[in-house]
Image (cartoon, helix red, strand yellow):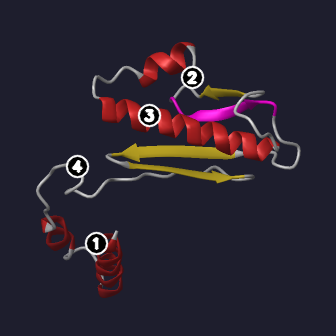
């Protein structure tokens, strides 16, 4: 990364945050390269919208008229979602324990009055799966 992209990446004083920011940018560049059929991470321009969301400015893949991607990172987790035709978004939140926070599932009880049984079951299943990883 060069110029403003590099400056933004190194804005944080914590090495762990810098590392996940760099990994997110590398994942974005790799996704763009794959969409364009390129082996390397050069030969294209990644820019940012006014809101700060990265996008592939040029060249645009002929077979993917609206190639779109989104990157999120938190703690040790970095994720990327992409789609050749539709806008995508992703958000990752590291487990409380991984962030050094005390584990707190009180929010589930607070929401239980607003959710029907199927929604509560889905949340329970999601938490069970997350606990395995």
Which residue carries the number 3 mark?
A: 21
Q: Earlier in the sequence, mark 1 or mark 2?
A: 2
Identify the disc placed on residue 131: 1
Identify the disc placed on residue 15: none
Residue at (14% x, 51% y) in the render: 101
In this rendering, position of residue 132 left or right of residue 34? left
CB of mark 4 within 8 Å of CB of mark 3? no
Q: Is residue 7 above or below residue 120?
A: above
Disc 3 on helix, strand or loop?
helix
Membership of 56 in magenta stretch:
yes
Q: How many marks can you see?
A: 4
Q: Is residue 129 above or below residue 74?
A: below
Which residue carries the number 2 mark?
A: 1
Q: Quadrant of residue 1?
A: top right
Q: Earlier in the sequence, mark 1 or mark 4?
A: 4
Which residue carries the number 4 mark?
A: 99
Disc 1 on helix, strand or loop?
helix
Residue at (64% x, 51% y) in the render: 82
- CA gap between label 1 and label 4 equals 15 Å
Q: Is residue 24 above or below residue 84?
A: above
- CA gap between label 4 and label 3 equals 16 Å
The region drawn magenta spans 52-59
Considering the image in quadrants, where does the C terminus appear?
A: bottom left
CB of mark 2 within 8 Å of CB of mark 3? no
- CA gap between label 1 and label 2 equals 35 Å
Q: Earlier in the sequence, mark 4 or mark 3?
A: 3
- CA gap between label 3 and label 1 equals 25 Å
């Amino acid at each position: 990364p060069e110029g403003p992209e590099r400056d933004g990446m190194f804005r944080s004083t914590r090495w762990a945050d810098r590392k996940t920011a760099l990994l997110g940018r590398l994942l974005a560049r790799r996704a763009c390269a794959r969409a364009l059929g390129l082996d390397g991470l050069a030969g294209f321009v990644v820019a940012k919208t006014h809101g700060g969301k990265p996008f592939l400015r040029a060249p645009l893949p002929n077979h993917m008229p609206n190639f779109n991607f989104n990157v999120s990172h938190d703690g040790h987790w970095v994720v990327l979602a992409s789609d050749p035709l539709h806008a995508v978004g992703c958000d990752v939140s590291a487990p409380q324990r991984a962030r050094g926070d005390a584990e707190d599932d009180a929010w589930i009880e607070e929401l239980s009055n607003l959710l029907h049984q199927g929604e509560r079951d889905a949340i329970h299943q999601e938490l069970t799966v997350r606990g395995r990883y």
